[in-house]
Amino acid sequence: MPTRPDLPTGPGMLLQWVNTHMAPAFFADDARWNGTLATAGYTLRVFLSIGIALFLAFVFQLQSPLSAATTVLIVANPTVGAMVSKSVWRIVGTLIGAGISVGIMAVFVQSPVLYFAALSVFVGLACMVATFLRFFRAYAAVLTGYTIVIIAAPAFANPDGIFLSAMSRLSVVATGIVVTACVFMVTSPRKPSTVLYKLGQAFRETVLHARTFHKAESERVTPEALENTVIDTLEKQEQKAQATSTAFRGLSQPIYDSRSKLLANMAGLTPAIEFAAADDPDMQNRVRNLRLCLNRLTGLIVSYHPYWLTFSAGVEETRSVHVLVAQTLGHVLELSQAPDWLSNPAPLSTCLHDALKTLEQLARQTTSTTTLAALDNTRDALVQMDLALHDLTSLRPDRTQANIQPYLEWPTALRNGVRGGFIALLAGMLWYVLHWSSGPLLIIYTVAASSLLSTTPSAAKASPMMATGTMLAIPMGFLCHTLALPRIDGYPLLWLSLCVFLLPGVWLQFHPRYSIGAFGYAVFFTMMLSVDNPIVYDDLTLTNNWMSMLAACALLAVVFRVILPADHRLDAARLVTSLTRSLQKLARTPYGRTEPWVAWEGMQLQKISRLMMRLSFIPANIDRQGYTDAAFASLSLGRLIVRLKWNAAHATLDPQAHAALNNAFNAFAHLRHNPAQTASALRQAAIAIRAIPIQEAGASLTPRDRTLSCLEQAANIILSVPGFFHDHGPIQLPEDRPQAAASVSAHPAVSSTFTG
């Protein structure tokens, strides 16, 4: 029998050929198939939790049984630790909201207008706190906000029943939370070690990222060759396409793609650490160290920006430094391939320490400020790498290390608070003036949606998606009430019908593009269903409820997008100003009271993360990549200030050198108004220190030369991005100004145009 010439004959090869040529791409792609299986598993757990919680709510004859299903949809999470954290804070928020609801109803029972005013104040405070809090702690504030309304709504007609309403709400929420926790903890694999493995991989990827640049520095011949050398290295590692050349002090797209990929990975690991700590006592003991490890790794990634890399471009005497570091990092990568390297980090630490000793010897043998700059920068990178390795592998919490405080973005929090308070007051007054019978549902939705939106990166951007998901739930609710519920004669059919209608919302919650809308669809679909025990159908009431939800969706979009819209350009400008002020504060701080570097850098990294997000929301032309690189350069500038302070406090410097350094630190007061003046003062300080005779400078020239290196690097960074530090830089100007689209790396000679 004849055979096709391209058809393999062996059984194994035949199966491979079938999978490659005949199976759909969906099944051939392992990543897509595994993602689909994970989503399907999560969906089945959610539906099982809904079935059990709803059944128990009917058995216990709770006032609103579908609230148990709503609770399941809110607290469910694929990660068990995240679900536990979410559930605990939901209970906390429900208790606080129940107490406040009973209190304000008791105080303002005879004054509806004052009641709505007090309600709006508490809702605004809840939205503001939800913006501040991180991870699922924000749900305590979210639940505080809309639990007040959910508990008070049934008691509007009978205020004496507020306490019973609060107890019913607590009961149904507790039922949903306990059921969800039991189902997910029994059916979900709990592997806290997975987080450690991912952190270990992040460490190796960071080392590889650093090695790429040091290897490129060691191999290039001319200053312009860095870009091509790095691109070639990245292409070999990731098979990326050749990119076009960019302007001076810019990096090509493959380099930015590689860095963005690493930063996105680090951002995803931050909540993973918190959730693993909520589920595992051993991880809870190590969570402080792991946070510091992740912060150090992120700082290492962003330290390789174009302004740092081009400072010592193409200098022959620095090549030996980069050769040494590239070889060291290559050896670290080889050692980290061992299966037990996380439990035995000593060989990696020894390799890094040996390289640090060699760098210190090289520093004593040179007086070139350029070489010292390369030595100090690479030494800082290796020190941070070693500290990150220690934090990653240490089994005991180190209480002596600095604690990284969360950054509180007050303008955004205040805006969300005003939005929440205003929409609550507006919905309450609409009900009070129009005497709408579905007014309580209008208030419940607007308060719940605004509270949930306060936890998103951009509430204004997410509000239309939330409103769209809710509006899609209205026709689906109509179909459920007309086609499914009238034909149900038992609980199994009710459960099956709910699962069918909730399937799109639960499934699409993992799609980044539709997650907010899908979440709104699933949660508020259950809120609109009239499923009681027994079920009573009232078409007029249902239609009235749907009309109130449509009005609430329109009100949500109007308040968040029209009345109180977000100004992402202004938010980004405020973050840029905050970064500059942090540098000024760091320069003004006395030597003995300087904040630990990891704490200062951790705070600035949070600002930069928010800055990058705000820049992505700005539709107009703006130098996004330039501002991102300049923000990273501000971290290097802070590191240089710390080095200068250390030299001034610990190194043997001439009194004249100390005076010159004080003048340099004082010059940072002009950074926001005249960056060129600050840079000029730094260079003048370097000239003054260099002019000090050798016999007066001390026996060793290394502290003096290192000080000169830091001063020159700091001046170089400031002059590279004057538009970033200046109070009237491009992003600080109105969008219609001609200079608003200028490059952040504009030449210092044109920085004066920003003041106009």
Image (cartoon, rainbow, N blue to C red):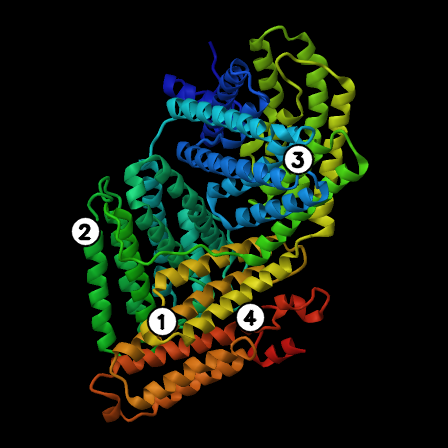
Q: Which one is in front, 105 or 637? A: 105
Q: Which one is in front, 734 or 432? A: 432
Q: Secondary structure at mark 2?
A: helix
Question: Which of pointers 4 and 3 indicates the residue nearer the eye?
Answer: 3
Q: Amino acid at mark 3?
A: Tyr
Residue 512 horizontal/vertical position (percent): 56, 38
Q: Residue at x 19, y 51 (%)?
A: 347
* Residue position marked by numbered label 4 in the rendering: 745
* Residue position marked by numbered label 2 in the rendering: 347
Q: Are marks 4 and 3 in contact (CB under 8 Å)?
A: no
Residue 114 horizontal/vertical position (percent): 69, 45
Residue 362 horizontal/vertical position (percent): 23, 73
Q: Amino acid at mark 1?
A: Val
Residue 75 horizontal side relative to residue 115, left or right: left
* Residue position marked by numbered label 3 in the rendering: 445
* Residue position marked by numbered label 1 in the rendering: 642
Q: CA distance from mark 3 to mark 1?
A: 50 Å
Q: Residue at x 77, y 40 (%)?
A: 430
Q: Quadrant of residue 536?
A: top right
Q: Tell me the quarter of the image containing the C terminus.
A: bottom right
Mark 4 closeness class: few <14, some 14–19, many ≥20 residues within 10 Å: many
Q: Is residue 541 above or below residue 371?
A: above
Question: Which of pointers 3 and 1 indicates the residue nearer the eye?
Answer: 3
- Sooner in the amino-acid sequence: mark 1 or mark 4: 1
Q: Which one is in front, 304 or 170? A: 170
Question: Which of pointers 2 and 1 indicates the residue nearer the eye?
Answer: 1
Q: CA distance from mark 2 to mark 1?
A: 30 Å
